[in-house]
Image (tube, rainbow, N blue to C red):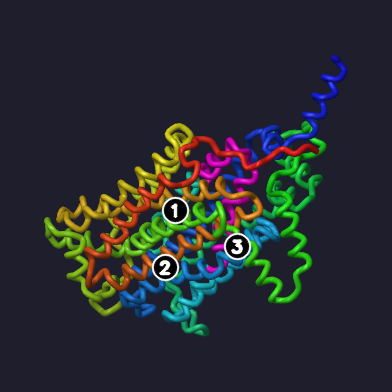
């Protein structure tokens, strides 16, 4: 009997399910480095798409931008994200997460370098669209890639850890903007007809974090979960052994793993893989893309897809739409304060400015392309709050639950947005504006929920689909602010505020939202 028990123990130890295999590899340096890389990639996305808000505030003379032009330019990057999200989700689920993330980061860096040389609105618009098109691949896929390096217990926490790094990275935005944009040098490039000014260099600097991440990821393997679902058990085990060695930082005995159990979605993934290799021509590829997407809108997936897409739509419409004009509006408010006014609302300032650009001219008619220092200070405070907020959320998320955090964020930010339309105390209005922008906290939480809700074979597509609706919200929000702000300012703030309150109520209907640990979607089936 003792001999049989020993034999049974060895079999159990050598033949485990995927979650237990990752648990055996432990949580260590590899996971921390991967969280740092993932958070930096998210930061790269923010710098590429949101950094343009500082450019449109100071490049009015060079690019001849009206307020509507600024709305278009601030939204076109998100349009590129929307157009490409479906493509990247399909490629990530069929070709691999890593094969999408690395190339798109390299291409984005090249396009951003070119965009810094553009001399008019339309040329810049095309380049920013392409930058959004490619940066979308890495920013949406990285959630699936990161989550699949962690077991069920640590998955959501890892994503929030990456979000904390993202929050720290956000602090770079006003810091880089202040250090680079508020300079007075210029470099004529005669053969291109370009006067290279600080705001152009700012664009290039914003793309550097993505380039660094792409280089580092060259040394990282493909997601072990994706490799396993491809049918290559030995490669999946090899990746888990690699994680184990990385975490130990020294030569250690290999983990006693000889095989990994199959999972309940394994057969579906195998069938998709066979279809992929057998598909021929454009028609076959389109049909395969449809088969990869359609399940998200059928059966038990439909409710999950609809909810996460709507929540991301509301989050991005508000956070990105309002943030795009955050530097410009704050700059206007502080200039009015410096002129001696004590009581006024944000909307009164916006109406007074009319359709003027936010770039002043000096006495000799030259462009003065700098922002008020207080604008950078408030932007810096906002980003610090973001970093601290993500850190706090990462600590308490398993204690208070994701539902409580979502309701608090959506409800608090929605109420702050409504207050903006009534209050005439400048600094209170500014702080309420900052709170409204902070609804971006919910985006990472919803992404973590999305990773939990969907199985491996459609997970990247689900994340990219919800991301696509989020970016659609960003496009609508940016253009809504650009077109309505000067004529219907109060309505422009009221719409996203009501939308956030609706998202708060809808959060109660997310499946399994009251569970405080990441649910398992694996099903042991024997080796």
Q: Earlier in the sequence, mark 1 or mark 3?
A: 1
How far apart are the alpha carbons under marks 2 and 3?
23 Å
Q: Earlier in the sequence, mark 1 or mark 2?
A: 1
Per the picture, the main secondary structure of the magenta-coloured stretch is helix
Q: Which residue is mark 1?
A: 172
> Which residues make up the magenta segment?
133-162
Question: Badge 2: how crowded within 10 Å, few (<14), some, or many (20+)?
Answer: many
Q: Earlier in the sequence, mark 2 or mark 3?
A: 3
Regarding residue 254, the answer to whether it shows in the image is no
Q: Nearer the viewer, residue 38 or 12?
A: 12
Q: Is residue 526 above or below residue 296?
A: above
Q: Quick check: 344 left or right of 200? A: left
How far apart are the alpha carbons under marks 1 and 3?
36 Å
Name the residue: 27% across, 79% down. 365
Question: What is the residue that sits farthest to the right in this orientation?
Answer: 3
Q: Is residue 239 magenta?
A: no
Q: Nearer the viewer, residue 300 or 5?
A: 300
SS at circle 3: helix
Q: How many marks?
A: 3
Name the residue: 31% across, 50% down. 413
Viewer-side label of 1, 2: 2
Q: Which residue is mark 3?
A: 293
Disc 1 and disc 3 in contact, CB within 8 angstroms: no
Q: Quick check: 355 left or right of 160? A: left
Q: Which residue is mark 2?
A: 475
Q: Position of residue 203 (x, y in %)?
A: 47, 66
Name the residue: 12% across, 59% down. 341
Q: Position of residue 430 (x, y in %)?
A: 25, 54
């Amino acid at each position: 009997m003792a001999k049989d028990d020993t034999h049974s123990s060895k079999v159990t130890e050598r033949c485990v399910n995927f979650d237990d295999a990752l648990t055996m590899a432990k949580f260590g340096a590899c996971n921390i480095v991967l969280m740092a890389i993932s958070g930096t990639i998210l930061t790269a996305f923010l710098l590429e798409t949101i950094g343009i808000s500082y450019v449109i505030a100071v490049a009015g003379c060079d690019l001849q931008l009206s307020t509507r032009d600024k709305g278009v330019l601030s939204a076109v990057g998100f349009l590129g994200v929307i157009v490409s999200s479906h493509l990247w989700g399909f490629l990530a689920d069929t070709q691999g997460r890593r094969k999408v993330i690395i190339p798109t980061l390299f291409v984005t860096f090249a396009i951003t370098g070119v965009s810094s040389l553009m001399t008019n609105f339309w040329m810049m618009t095309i380049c920013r669209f392409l930058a959004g098109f490619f940066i979308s691949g890495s920013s949406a896929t990285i959630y699936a890639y990161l989550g699949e390096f962690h077991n069920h217990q640590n998955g959501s926490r890892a994503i929030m850890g990456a979000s904390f790094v993202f929050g720290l990275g956000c602090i770079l935005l006003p810091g880089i903007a202040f250090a680079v944009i508020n300079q007075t040098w210029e470099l004529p490039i005669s053969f291109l007809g370009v006067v290279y000014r600080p705001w152009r260099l700012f664009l290039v600097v914003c793309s550097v974090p993505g380039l660094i991440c792409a280089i580092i990821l060259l040394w990282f393997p493909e997601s072990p979960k994706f490799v396993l679902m491809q049918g290559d058990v030995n490669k999946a085990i090899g990746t888990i052994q690699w994680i184990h060695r990385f975490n130990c930082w020294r030569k250690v005995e290999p983990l006693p793993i000889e095989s990994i159990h199959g999972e309940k979605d394994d057969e579906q993934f195998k069938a998709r893989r066979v279809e992929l290799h057998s598909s021929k021509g454009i028609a076959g590829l389109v049909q395969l893309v449809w088969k990869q997407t359609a399940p998200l809108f059928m059966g038990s997936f439909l409710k999950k897809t609809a909810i996460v897409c709507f929540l991301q739509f509301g989050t991005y419409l508000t956070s990105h739409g309002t943030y795009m004009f955050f530097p410009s509006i704050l700059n206007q408010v502080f200039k009015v304060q410096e002129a001696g006014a004590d009581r006024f609302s944000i909307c009164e300032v916006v109406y007074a400015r009319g359709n003027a650009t936010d770039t002043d001219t000096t006495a000799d008619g030259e462009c003065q392309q700098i922002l008020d220092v207080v604008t950078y200070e408030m932007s810096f405070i906002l980003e610090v709050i973001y970093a601290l907020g993500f850190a706090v959320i990462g600590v308490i998320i398993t204690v208070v639950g994701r539902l409580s955090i979502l309701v608090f964020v959506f409800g608090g930010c929605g109420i702050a947005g409504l207050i903006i339309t009534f209050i005439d105390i400048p600094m209170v209005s500014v702080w309420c504006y900052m709170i409204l922008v902070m609804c971006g906290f919910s985006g990472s939480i919803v992404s973590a929920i999305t990773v939990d809700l969907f199985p491996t074979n459609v997970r990247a597509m689900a994340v990219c689909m919800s991301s696509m609706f989020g970016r659609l919200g960003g496009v609508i929000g940016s253009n809504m602010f650009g077109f309505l702000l000067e004529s219907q300012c109060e309505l422009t703030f009221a719409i996203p505020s009501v939308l956030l309150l609706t998202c708060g109520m809808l959060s109660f209907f997310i499946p399994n939202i009251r569970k405080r640990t990441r649910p398992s979607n694996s099903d042991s089936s024997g080796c």
